[in-house]
Image: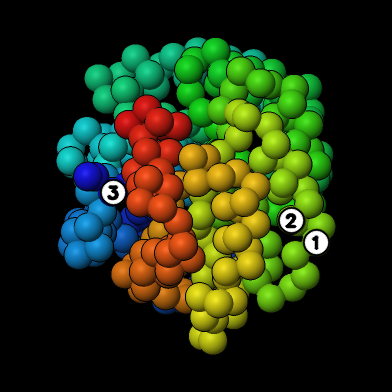
Amino acid sequence: MSRVDAHHHVWDLSVRQQTWMVGPELDPIRRNFSIEDLAPLAAAADITSTVLVQTVGLVEETVEFLEIAAGNDLVAGVVGWVDLTADDIAEALDGLRSRPDGAYLKAIRHQVHDEPDDNWLLRPDVQRGLTAIADAGLAYDLLTKTPHLPAAIQTARNLPQLTFVVDHISKPVIGEPLEPWATQLRELAALPNVTCKLSGMVTEAPWTTWKPTDLQPYADVVLEAFTPARVMFGSDWPVCLLAATYNQVVETAETLTSSLTPAEHDAIFTTTATRTYNL
């Protein structure tokens, strides 16, 4: 059976800078990363297809990612970016989807956790933009932290026709109390149009000292709240390299889900992503 890594990135710093790379602690990933760099790592971990996810708020990057997907068998789908607040968002989405490689566009994402307004998702122009994403038959990746979860819950309630995907389990700080993150994530999980990526945890833990047992309580909340049928694995490569190798991230996900049945395990590593993103 195929195995899916539902969340990774690439970037070329000679094309554009990654403006979120602030501070010397990010120096280990302040270089170029390509699909060609990922391919042998994925093969060694028995990953057969991936979802390539936006890193900056530029449509030009989305176009580049669609071209990468069309030219590489490893990439099965792209989570891109458009301006959710633009009056012409429907036209922008149609322009991307009508490209020869437009079928690889599966979802849209915005760096909500960087917006100064915790309720940014609830703005009328953003809600209109999210409606356009649903109308285009795409999903929407929620890049949030705990303070943004109340707005995310209301947004998912407002738009039952749109499939939402929580990135990085909404980035709780590993080692801090589970609440209020756990209660709010369970409330979000109670909505049937929301799925969750088991991803991004190693970089929310102490980078040099984390252990799988540190992550287990958070993974358990996700698995209980969403059930494996709505959870998918993502590596968050190459960001994960700040705290772990690609193979360590895959092996850790295997450890965190080791108590599951084979069918539940297949959901996390294959079928949830395949269904959610129509891969």
Q: Residue at x 26, y 54 (%)?
A: 47
From the image, tell me which residue sits under label 2. 182
Asked which secondary structure carries label 2, the reply is helix
How many badges with numbers are in the image? 3
Examine the rendered structure and indicate whether residue 119 appears above or below residue 215. Answer: above
Asked which secondary structure carries label 1, the reply is loop
Which percent across, then down, holds residue 93?
A: 47, 19
Examine the rendered structure and indicate whether residue 47 appears above or below residue 2. Answer: below
Q: Earlier in the sequence, mark 3 or mark 1?
A: 3
Q: Residue at x 62, y 51 (%)?
A: 224
Quadrant occupied by the N terminus: top left
- Amino acid type at circle 3 is Arg
Rounded to the nearest whole Å, what is the CA distance between mark 3 and mark 1? 32 Å
From the image, tell me which residue sits under label 1. 179
In the rendered image, is residue 263 in sight?
A: yes
From the image, tell me which residue sits under label 3. 3
- Amino acid type at circle 1 is Glu
